[in-house]
Image (cartoon, helix red, strand yellow):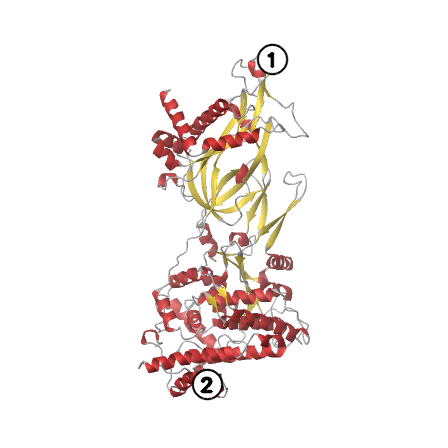
């Protein structure tokens, strides 16, 4: 008895020090509303186990290892405080005080951590544990009985009135444990009956308290590793049923990982006993990705600082060499990297995605390349054509009979990539559904009320927050007219409206010659015979882990769109609308601006910069223009099909030729804007490109003055003729840059020996 009194005294001291008594007073003041009369009154008390252990080790041990007994101690102290301080007149017995202990945290020890992969789970004490899991299914919010009052049928018994017999829900208890007709009076052993005299409009308003309940299925986060693979894995992950009650309802979303504090419980449903978790606290689990960058990438970034395009070009060139030989599918590789970098939820909880549709006549190698890229995503799901892509329904198995919503591949890929695969495997109805989801980024779930015990049919709208990758076989005719506009591509079974919904389209394979086919064949055979040997003799060797670290770091970069890049994007958008509206009748949607900005930001992040430059906008324009050309035909801009990678970038000369080609394309874009968007010349000046070259020339002049001359690159050489023929304002020092450039025009540029290609 003395131990119990000591524990209660410690509870009182803890409530007084932690502000619990003040909160209890405020909650009781809200109960004094004359319109509110209930059988049970609920009080939530925040419990910090560390503070409890410091105050009273016995009380802390009781809270962590016997939560039901600890709840009774807090209930007793709260009732005494209410009666002693006269906080409310509506509470007459201790049974009316329903105390819920909410843990702020648990000790970081293995004993208080539950691994959802561990078996068996049914043994051990029913004490609070912490777990991490992914939501794969959840029910609608339903009602359950929190508490009810029972009266003795013997009129002479004191329990025939008042609040002597109160049934309150306990963790692990079913509905039948609270509402039954075979309870007996503790005084006279007579039968108890439920008091339903104050029913209002069919709801037990006063003596029968109904609150919310929701069931959630959690699975270990490692289950996503199985969903990345194309082959079926022998591993199976069993889900755990989690009960969310009252204020915790709707605190979890499908496809998201959470850290849950809960109490394991055995749910008795004759003739079986199921194991579940009563949730006590829910917290969204932020993914922990590495933020460091490989020293090899940092060295490459430092060496390529003279050009805003070279770093991303080499990163793309060396990407996926286990699947495809170097030099092939570079535009697709860059697009995959940009999508991986851009797919993320920002600090404002706004999701950014970059959908990708690949058109090819031979999908085998490209499918492998996309599957390899999927393995680099923080979260990636490969959809199986026989499975459900968005959501499915089933009847709940825990007695409620309500609809249980199961997450499909797209919802499981929340915050990551969903690889849809070949679209020719889907029927027209499924393709239309995919188009609707791509356009609205939501999926609608219809719940028939009659089937799942509801009064009326319901329609739910679930957000879809992932990027979609898909393939289309161009060898299958789509039925488009043969007299299509010049530049359009055969999209296979994909309707034009669905292609528009994807946004970015990349065509691969149709222009690959016999030499590229031979290179792919040799590459595949060498990988089969010598899988561990690196096939390309170059110092630019990066592992899969290097790319994972690079992408993780790039994703977390916060970038700012400069005025130059913004003006180029908006100028191209206005010019493209006018250039395509008259001859082709094509209307460029506003979504094109979002696509352009996303591509520019992604390229900026991939280059490990925080300011989106005009050069990033050039890459975005080239990719977007190629995509629009494949759908609607060429425009007056008339860029080549492989504009982003016009030549092999595996050696120094190739990088120099690419820089020169990119500068030419930059000027072509500016001339296109001047011709079709006359207002653009007010804020876009061709001199910006020239001033950028002059800045590099001035740097060379400064190095020459310091005795460290740096040779001039061919891209700058091609620009000197135009620069030298123009009249520039005096005082800018441009003539020094011109002289430095002209004096070194004969010397070719050399890269540092540490990164030169063999």
Percent position (x, y) of residue 319? 42, 68
Do callouts 2 and 1 mark residues in contact (Cβ within 8 Å)? no
The answer for how far apart the CA atoms under marks 2 and 1 are is: 108 Å
Pick whichever, 339 or 694, lies toward us: 694
Q: Name the image quarter holding the N terminus.
A: top left
Q: Earlier in the sequence, mark 2 or mark 1?
A: 1
Q: Which residue is mark 1?
A: 155
Q: Is residue 239 above or below residue 39?
A: below
Image point (46%, 85%), residue name? 720
Pick whichever, 53 or 290, lies toward us: 53
Percent position (x, y) of residue 603? 48, 67
Residue farthest along the left direction in this orientation: 707
- At label 2, counting other C-alpha atoms closer than 10 Å, the crowd grade (few under 14, some 14-19, many 20 or more) is many
Q: Which residue is mark 2?
A: 720
Residue farthest along the top direction in this orientation: 156
Q: Which label number is shown at residue 137?
A: none
Taking the image as drawn, is residue 690 in sight?
yes
Residue farthest along the front direction in this orientation: 731
Taking the image as drawn, is residue 647 in sight?
no
- At label 1, counting other C-alpha atoms closer than 10 Å, the crowd grade (few under 14, some 14-19, many 20 or more) is few
Q: Name the image quarter holding the C terminus.
A: bottom left
Percent position (x, y) of residue 199? 65, 26
> How many tags in the picture?
2
Image point (55%, 47%), residue name? 406
Q: Secondary structure at mark 2?
A: helix
Q: Is residue 177 above or below residue 431?
A: above
Image point (54%, 29%), residue name? 41
Image point (63%, 24%), residue name? 196
Percent position (x, y) of residue 423? 58, 62
Pick whichever, 313 or 693, lies toward us: 693
């Amino acid at each position: 008895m003395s131990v119990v009194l000591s524990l209660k005294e410690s509870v009182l001291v803890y409530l007084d020090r932690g502000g619990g008594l003040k909160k209890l007073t405020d909650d009781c003041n809200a109960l004094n509303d004359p319109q509110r009369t209930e059988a049970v009154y609920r009080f939530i008390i925040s419990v910090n186990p560390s503070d409890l252990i410091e105050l009273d080790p016995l009380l802390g041990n009781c809270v962590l290892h016997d939560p039901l007994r600890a709840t009774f101690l807090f209930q007793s102290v709260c009732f005494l405080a209410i009666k002693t301080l006269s906080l409310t007149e509506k509470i007459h017995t201790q049974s009316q005080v329903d105390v819920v202990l909410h843990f702020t945290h648990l000790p970081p020890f293995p004993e208080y951590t539950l691994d959802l992969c561990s078996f068996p789970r049914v043994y051990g004490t029913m004490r609070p544990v912490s777990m991490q899991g992914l939501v794969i299914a959840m029910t609608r919010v339903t009602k359950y009985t929190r508490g009810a009052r029972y009266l003795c049928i013997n009129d002479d018994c004191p329990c025939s009135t008042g609040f002597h017999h109160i049934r309150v829900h306990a963790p692990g208890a079913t509905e039948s444990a609270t509402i039954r007709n075979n309870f007996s009076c503790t005084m006279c052993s007579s039968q108890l009956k439920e008091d339903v005299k104050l029913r209002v409009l069919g709801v037990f308003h006063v003596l029968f308290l109904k609150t919310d309940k929701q069931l959630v299925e959690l699975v270990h986060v490692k289950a996503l590793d199985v969903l990345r693979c194309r082959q079926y894995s022998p591993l199976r992950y069993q889900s755990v049923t989690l009960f969310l009650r009252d204020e915790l309802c709707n605190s979890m979303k499908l496809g998201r990982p959470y850290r849950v504090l809960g109490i394991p419980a055995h749910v008795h449903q004759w003739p079986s006993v199921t194991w579940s978790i009563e949730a006590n606290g829910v917290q969204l689990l932020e993914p922990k990705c590495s933020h460091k960058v490989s020293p090899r990438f940092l060295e490459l970034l430092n060496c390529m600082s003279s050009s805003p395009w070279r770093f991303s070009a080499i990163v793309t060139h060396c990407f996926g060499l286990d699947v495809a030989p170097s030099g092939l599918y570079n535009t697709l590789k860059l697009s995959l990297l940009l999508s991986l970098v851009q797919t993320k939820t920002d600090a404002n909880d706004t999701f950014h995605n970059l959908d990708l549709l690949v058109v090819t006549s031979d999908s085998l190698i490209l499918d492998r390349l996309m599957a390899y890229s999927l393995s680099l995503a923080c979260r990636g799901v490969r959809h199986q054509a026989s499975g459900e892509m968005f959501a499915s329904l089933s009847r709940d198995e825990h007695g409620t009979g309500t609809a249980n919503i199961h997450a499909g591949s797209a919802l499981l890929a929340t915050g990551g990539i969903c690889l849809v695969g070949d679209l020719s495997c889907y029927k027209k109805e499924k393709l239309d559904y995919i188009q609707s989801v791509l356009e609205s980024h939501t999926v609608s779930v219809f719940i028939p009320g009659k089937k799942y015990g509801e009064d009326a049919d319901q329609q739910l709208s679930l957000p879809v927050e992932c990027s979609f990758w898909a393939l289309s076989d161009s060898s299958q005719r789509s039925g488009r007219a043969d007299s299509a506009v010049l530049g359009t591509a055969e999209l296979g079974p994909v309707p034009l409206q669905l292609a528009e919904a994807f946004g970015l389209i990349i065509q691969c394979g149709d222009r690959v010659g016999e030499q590229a086919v031979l290179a792919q064949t040799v590459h595949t055979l060498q990988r089969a015979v010598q899988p561990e040997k690196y096939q390309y003799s170059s110092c630019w060797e990066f592992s899969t882990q290097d790319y994972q670290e690079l992408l993780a770091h790039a994703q977390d970069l916060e970038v700012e769109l400069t005025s130059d890049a913004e003006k180029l994007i908006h100028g191209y958008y206005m010019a493209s609308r006018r250039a395509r509206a008259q001859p082709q009748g094509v209307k460029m949607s506003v979504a094109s601006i979002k696509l352009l900005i996303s591509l520019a930001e992604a390229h900026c992040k991939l280059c490990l910069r925080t300011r989106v430059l005009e050069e990033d906008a050039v890459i975005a324009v080239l990719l977007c223009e190629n995509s629009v050309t494949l759908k609607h035909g060429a425009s007056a801009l008339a860029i080549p099909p492989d504009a982003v990678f016009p030549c092999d970038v595996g050696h120094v000369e190739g990088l120099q030729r690419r820089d020169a080609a990119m500068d030419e394309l930059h000027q072509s874009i500016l001339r296109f804007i001047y011709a079709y968007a006359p207002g653009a010349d007010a804020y876009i000046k061709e001199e910006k490109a020239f001033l950028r070259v002059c800045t590099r020339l001035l740097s060379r002049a400064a190095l020459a003055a310091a005795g460290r001359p740096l040779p001039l690159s061919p891209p700058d050489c091609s620009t000197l003729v135009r620069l030298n023929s123009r009249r520039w304002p005096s005082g800018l020092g441009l003539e020094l840059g011109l002289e430095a450039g002209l004096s070194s025009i004969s010397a070719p540029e050399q890269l540092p020996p540490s990164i030169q290609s063999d």
